[in-house]
Amino acid sequence: LKYMKSLNEFQEWKKELDIKVKRWKNYFINIIQNSEISLPEKKAVITNTFESVLSNISKSYSHLSKEFIPYCKQTVENIYNQLQNEVNRLQGNLLINLTPGNL
């Protein structure tokens, strides 16, 4: 019963995270495609937002059962890769080197 409760909490965390990732991708798309924002500003906004997003995600699973933490860390790493790939795909010449701080 305890495991099932923990599993449900993990699944709910993951579901909410998937929704947030879609919003972040849209946010990055809007920044990159906004012609009123200079390239240096785009880099700064995306880098700062990216770091904030990763930090918030990393903190968001602290309440989950310890047995799910490795899955959470892998999920954060996958999200990092998804967002990095999306940024690279949208604007190849933006060349923002995003690095995950502490996943």
Image (spheres, grey):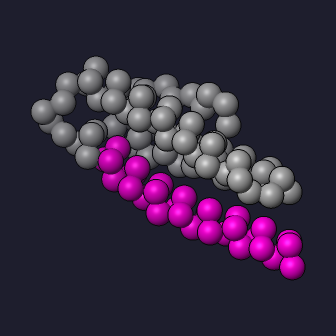
Region of the chain picked out in magenta, as a range? 1-29
Please provide percent x and percent y for residue 55: 57, 36
The correct choice, above or below, for 21 with respect to 80 in the image is below
Of residue 31 and residue 88, the one placed in the foreground of this image is: 31
Q: Main secondary structure of the magenta part?
A: helix
Rendered position, 65 above or below 94: below
- Is-magenta flag for residue 17? yes
Q: Is residue 69 left or right of residue 54?
A: right
Residue 99 vertical placement versus 79 (above, below): above
The x and y percentages for residue 18 are 52, 62
Query: Residue 72: x percent and y percent?
Result: 71, 52
Q: Residue at x 34, y 53 (%)?
A: 26
Q: Is residue 73 left or right of residue 87?
A: right
Choose top left, top right, bottom left or bottom right for residue 23.
bottom left
- Total marks shown come to 0
Q: Quadrant of the C terminus?
A: top right
Residue 76 seen by the camera = yes
Q: Return the x and y of residue 35 as percentages of the image width and height.
A: 15, 36
- Let me know if residue 73 is in the magenta part: no
Q: Is residue 61 left or right of residue 23?
A: right
- Point out the residue furthest to the bottom here: 1
Residue occupying image coordinates x 70% and y 48% = 62
